[in-house]
Image (tube, rainbow, N blue to C red):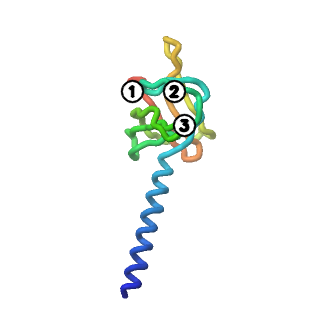
């Protein structure tokens, strides 16, 4: 009887651990920023970034991590992509001061987008 309880406990813990890992990976993507752009109050340099967010939406906190260091954290909105989105994409806007700002990141595989408002920049 003790063996059954122990085996059941191990199985439950293993399942909970794998579910948590899956959820964590779902809220993380890698993006390539090709040009300098403004994210919140941070000027981002070109390069690869891990984009991670906290929460299930629609309002979330998004962190940009490079080489294990958080470079910027900004508020964003998680939304479902339009059906015509077929590839990952970074949408920017150039301000009147000729500053490129991040507006949206589209993830085609998961059909999700992270949207950033100008007021949060």
Q: Residue furthest top?
A: 97
Residue 44 marker: 2
SS at mark 3 in the image: strand
Residue drawn at x 49%, y 38% is: 65
User: Badge 2: how crowded within 10 Å, few (<14), some, or many (20+)?
Assistant: some
SS at mark 2 in the image: strand
Residue 120 marker: 1
Residue drawn at x 47%, y 38% is: 69
Q: Earlier in the sequence, mark 3 or mark 2?
A: 2
Q: Earlier in the sequence, mark 3 or mark 1?
A: 3
Q: Are marks 1 and 2 in contact (CB under 8 Å)?
A: no
Q: Are marks 3 and 1 in contact (CB under 8 Å)?
A: no
Q: Earlier in the sequence, mark 1 or mark 2?
A: 2
- Nearer to us in this view, 51 or 45: 45
Residue drawn at x 53%, y 13% is: 98
Residue 46: x and y in percent read 58, 28
Q: Which residue is under mark 3?
A: 49
Residue 68: x and y in percent read 50, 41
User: Badge 1: how crowded within 10 Å, few (<14), some, or many (20+)?
Assistant: few
């Amino acid at each position: 009887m003790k063996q059954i309880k122990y085996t059941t406990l191990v199985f439950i813990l293993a399942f909970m651990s794998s579910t948590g890992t899956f959820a964590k990976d779902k809220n993380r993507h890698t993006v390539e920023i090709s040009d300098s752009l403004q994210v919140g109050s941070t000027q981002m340099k070109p390069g690869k970034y891990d984009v991670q967010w906290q929460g299930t939406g629609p309002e979330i906190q998004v962190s940009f991590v490079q080489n294990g260091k958080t470079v910027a954290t900004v508020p964003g909105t998680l939304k479902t992509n339009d059906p015509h989105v077929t590839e990952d994409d970074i949408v920017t806007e150039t301000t009147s001061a000729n500053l490129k700002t991040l507006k949206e990141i589209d993830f085609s595989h998961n059909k999700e987008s992270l949207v950033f408002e100008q007021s949060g920049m």
